[in-house]
Amino acid sequence: MLESLQHLATGFTIAATIHNLFYCLMGTIVGTLIGVLPGIGPIAGIALLIPATFGLHPTSAIIMLAGIYYGAMYGGSTTSILLNVPGETASVITCIDGYQMAQKGRAGPALAICAIGSFIAGTIGLFGLVFLAPPLAQAALAFGPPEYFSLMVFGFVVLSNVTGASLLKALMMAIVGLIIGTIGLDPVTGDARFTFGSIYLLGGIEFVAVAIGLFGIGEVLINVEKPAGMLEQRVLIPRLRELYPTLRDIKRSIGPILRGAGIGFGVGLVPGPAPVIATYSSYMIERKISKTPDDFGKGAIEGVAGPESANNSACQAAFIPLFVLGIPFAPPTAILLGALLIHGVSPGPLMISLHPGLFWGVVASMYIGNFILLVLNLPFVPLFANILRIPKKILLPLIILFCITGMFTVNNSVFDIWVMLLLGGIGFLMRKWAYEGAPLLLALVLGPKLEVAFRQSLMISHGDFGFFFNRPISMAFLLATMIFLVIPLIRVIFKKTMKGGGRQ
Amino acid sequence: MKRDEIIVGMVIFLFGAATALLSLRMPIGTFRMAGTGLFPLCLGILLMILSAAFVLKLFLQHKKIFTPKETIVKAPGTIKQIVLFVGTLGLATLFFNKLGYPLIAFLLIVALLRILGMKRWTWNILLSLVTAITSYFLFVQWLKIPLPKGWIGL
């Protein structure tokens, strides 16, 4: 424990250099801007800015990208409260009471509680990360190819189960992502697959192109379709002096903040869109234990404090599986994994010992980033809110130009821009037919790892599939996977039985 | 809308079938010593099974239980706008290397602003010029990103 604290102190000396502080500050500000703009969520935001980090040291690059992630999550809450438009999916719950508070002229306290709650949850999450990551990394050393394979399958199924309207659709998207991930050189034999003789495809499909295409261009096209001027007329911009919560607000919020932080951290450790589940769970729990549950939905500050803290805490906890296992459980951390790989850092159980400077520096920078968000963003809320007044017809071309420039920068290749545009079109159609992009992206990033784990396991076991069930950890993950696959079926059968019973 | 859903399901099925067929052209090997094509073959078959189940489920449903968030087509004007928007992006990509970054940035913004409804040419050109110059200085001069110079040589 003491050792972890010493490492954390070293991390702070790395993160607190002028250079890294600057990138942390840049990341949080840019992230907030991205979060505030409806349509450009944290996934597209991080993907868009990866090329901007190419010239940086890996530690500075990841510090900046992690800052963008936090900032985007925070910015998303701002639009939820002021506009009733969630900047990203995790802020949907904040809309319920946050916007009601804004309607009653209490947007300031709602935004302030968001920032304070996020900071407290971030602090709790930081200590969780510091004390849990090293022992978990030790435990992860016992993971062999079958355990990794089963864990990744479990991750896909859980993510597919909780995203979107249909499990089948989400699973299909995960398989499509895995197929796209097989394009290029075979990770085991080095033979070319699905390249059709093109040298551009030998390196595989650039995941940044898929991320920007699906989540950036796809969202822009959705916005092109919407009528003009939908957003800019409804912005409620609080004045600076209205921003501070009363003592009563803080008293009412402290319980939900602490509970939200705990829920968020626990949920963040398991596969799936942790922030979404965490915010939803926190809101439900707060409403259930509240003495005045009827206030929820009408502007209860607990309905903002709890979910926002859970959101931040879940984001922080999501870094643990990424750093410790090298397996991201959610799309934003999948993008961060891609960024780490681009910078020559391969996350996994040995990351803490092989790259201690990067690991502890990034951990410390998360805390600094949270502090920057608390100190800087609150006074700048009116400024950020004004960004929403930029007409869509000006904003969308700028985003497009940034997407194209960013995409070209990755490999100096026009081919990547074509791929991005193609995926943008597909992303647009996917939204139209309610197909989730998150399982596809996660599968694309994890696909090569999954294949290697699958083939290595079969090689070790001489082609015996029972090997996956003979090892206890692997079996536990596969059993959990089966449960997650069977639950929706049981739910459907139960509903049908209830309906049938109702008719009689 | 159910018909569209079925068509999408079938397209996904065909994608799975194409993957499986193309995988069969590669060495498959055995489970003990998997070849290059084994993993994509398994994925292709799995996708075919899932999409077939999805289509079958839709066929068996007597009533529409799922409504997409938005309709596919809102108005003829919207389709035209989307087609023009995507077409402009395609043209910009096609001439990206030939015309060079600053010029493409300017022309792209001019076209997109026009498509999105900026009627006044003076504002349009001024805004596009400012954007192109700013992005040129930001990406090319400051961040030193080697973007195509094109025939204007900037």
Image: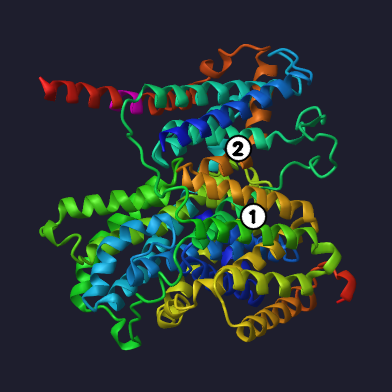
**Disc 2 target residue:** A177
Majority secondary structure in the magenta region: helix
Q: Is residue A261 left or right of residue B55?
A: left
On screen, residue A135 above or below A306: above
Q: Which of A346 and B112 lies nearest the eye of the viewer?
A: B112
Residue A308: x %, y % from top left:
35, 61
Tell me if A295 is positioned left or right of A113 in this view: left
Tags 1 and 2 in contact by the CB under 8 Å rule? no
User: Disc 1: which chain?
Assistant: A
Mark number displayed over residue A356: 1
x and y percentages locating residue B52 in the rendered image: 50, 22
Task: Check the picture and name the quadrant holding the C terminus of chain A.
Answer: top left
Badge 1 element: helix
Which quarter of the figure has residue A109?
A: bottom left
- Left or right of A96? Residue A70 is right
Q: Is residue A486 above or below residue A41?
A: above
- Of residues B83 and A197, which is closer to you in this image? B83
Q: In terms of secondary structure, where does tag 2 sit?
A: helix
Residue at image location 35% in from the left, 37% down from the top = B66
State which tag comes first along the sequence, 1 or 2.
Answer: 2
Percent x, y for residue A300?
20, 65
Query: As shown in the figure, which amino acid type bears the numbered disc 1?
Result: Pro
Q: Quadrant of residue A375?
A: bottom left
1 vs 2, front mark: 2
Residue in the picture at 26% in, 78% down: A245
The kind of residue on which mark 2 rests is Gly
Of A317 and A182, the residue lying toward us: A182
Q: Which chain is disc 2 placed on? A: A
Total numbered badges shown on the rendered structure: 2
Residue numbers of the magenta segment: A487-491
Residue B130, magenta (yes or no):
no
